[in-house]
């Protein structure tokens, strides 16, 4: 069911009405078309909106899935993100075992928008829907052709090695990815989940356009030299999980955790286990106060916080339903004040001490 937002004439899913603040967020979202910020991705000519649309969760069940997913809602979420002004989509073959890429392809055929497409390689799967790392040359080439077909595009804008696993094969995989770039199958190539040492091993073979690492208030490992390293080499950085799998959105509770589908991978993640989970919930209550003081949501705060670092080109923000990306897209236009950043740092220091004391 759809409803018309009368002062804009736009159509949004009726589910947006379930949450009273959503009408305000829709208004924020429409304003984003004029002021969504963007940054250049490293050495490339790609100028990305600072919020990109992530499609990990919409793929449906697999080893690291998020439970059942309605395909129509997934496509609607993609279209809503593009209408909000987001100009790039991140996906991967392993997300739903090809299904996420297929949904992106279907959405692209339903819109006039022409977003940049970033996808990945290096993870296959078995009959148990489990990931199987593979970085062999022939496999990389085969994966690329399969992704092009599922996405329904002629070229992939950013092709990324998903994990450096098996590590001994990263050079041969990178060489094959370079061949794909030279052949015009992909425009630029990058890596995900790589260390500085691993990047050093491959960057002399072919230019590294980007790094995709995890980064959130709860996981700040990239601040230990990796962000500075990428800035020095002009390697773009697109971070994933800025909302830490939904934990920093302000909508999680013990009841919600208990109600997650049995095949939702978050049930097994350390952040959703005690004592980490309870400590995170307490932190989020304090973060809500900072967000509300600025007329924003906690999810927007979590995204804007990672974007405070100039080394970060953009943040990948996942959405399973239209109202989620309608809420989070406006994080792109929010530059945190120094006062807010200092307050958040204090809260994070207290959180770290609390977790360490358990």
Image (spheres, rainbow, N blue to C red):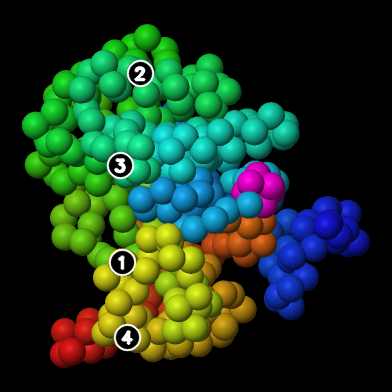
Residue 15: x and y, percent?
A: 74, 65
Q: Is mark 2 on a helix, strand or loop?
A: helix
Question: Tag on residue 279?
Answer: 4
Residue at x 59% of width, y 38% of height: 103
Q: Is residue 75 magenta?
A: yes
Q: Quadrant of the N terminus?
A: bottom right
Q: Is residue 124 left or right of residue 175?
A: right
Spatial CA distance of label 1 from label 3 is: 17 Å
Question: Tag on residue 236?
Answer: none
Instruction: Tell me, yes or no, whether the two marked residues, 3 and 2, touch with CB atoms within 8 Å.
Output: no
Residue 192: x and y, percent?
A: 28, 42
* First in residue order: circle 3 vs circle 2: 3
Q: What element carries label 1?
A: loop
The mark lying in front, picked from 4 and 1, is: 1
Spatial CA distance of label 3 from label 2 is: 17 Å
Residue 206: x and y, percent?
A: 22, 22
The mark lying in front, picked from 4 and 2, is: 2
| Residue extent of the magenta highlight | 71-76
Q: Name the residue under label 3.
A: 131
Q: Mark 2 points at which residue?
A: 142
Spatial CA distance of label 4 from label 2 is: 44 Å
Q: What element carries label 3?
A: strand
């Amino acid at each position: 069911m759809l409803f018309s937002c009368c002062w804009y004439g736009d159509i949004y899913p009726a589910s947006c009405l379930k949450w009273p603040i959503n009408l305000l967020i829709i208004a924020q979202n429409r304003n984003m078309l004029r002021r969504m910020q963007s940054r250049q991705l490293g050495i490339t000519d790609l100028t990305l909106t600072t919020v990109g649309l992530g499609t990990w969760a919409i793929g449906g069940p697999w080893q690291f899935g998020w439970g059942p997913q309605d395909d129509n809602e997934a496509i609607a979420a993609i279209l809503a993100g593009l209408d909000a002004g987001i100009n790039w989509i991140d996906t991967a073959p392993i997300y739903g075992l090809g299904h996420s890429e297929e949904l992106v392809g279907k959405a692209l055929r339903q819109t006039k928008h022409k977003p940049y497409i970033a996808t990945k390689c290096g993870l296959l799967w078995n009959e148990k829907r489990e990931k199987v790392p593979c970085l062999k040359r022939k496999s990389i080439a085969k994966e690329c052709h399969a992704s092009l077909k599922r996405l329904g595009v002629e070229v992939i804008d950013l092709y990324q090695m998903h994990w450096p696993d098996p590590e001994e094969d990263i050079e041969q995989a990178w060489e094959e990815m370079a061949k794909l770039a030279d052949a015009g199958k992909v425009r630029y190539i990058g890596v995900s989940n790589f260390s500085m040492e691993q990047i050093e091993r491959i960057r002399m073979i072919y230019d590294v356009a980007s790094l995709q690492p995890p980064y959130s208030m709860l996981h700040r490992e990239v601040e230990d030299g990796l962000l500075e390293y990428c800035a020095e080499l002009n390697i773009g950085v697109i971070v994933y999980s800025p909302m830490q799998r939904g934990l920093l959105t302000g909508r999680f509770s013990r009841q919600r955790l208990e109600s997650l589908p049995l095949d939702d991978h978050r049930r097994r993640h350390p952040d959703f286990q005690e004592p980490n989970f309870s400590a995170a919930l307490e932190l989020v209550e304090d973060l809500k106060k900072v967000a509300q003081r600025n007329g924003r949501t906690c999810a927007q705060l979590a995204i804007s916080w990672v974007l405070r670092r100039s080394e970060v080109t953009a943040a990948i923000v996942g959405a399973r339903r239209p109202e989620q990306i309608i809420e989070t897209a406006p994080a792109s236009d929010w530059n945190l004040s120094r006062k807010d950043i200092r307050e958040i740092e204090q809260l994070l220091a207290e959180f770290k001490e609390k977790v360490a004391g358990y």
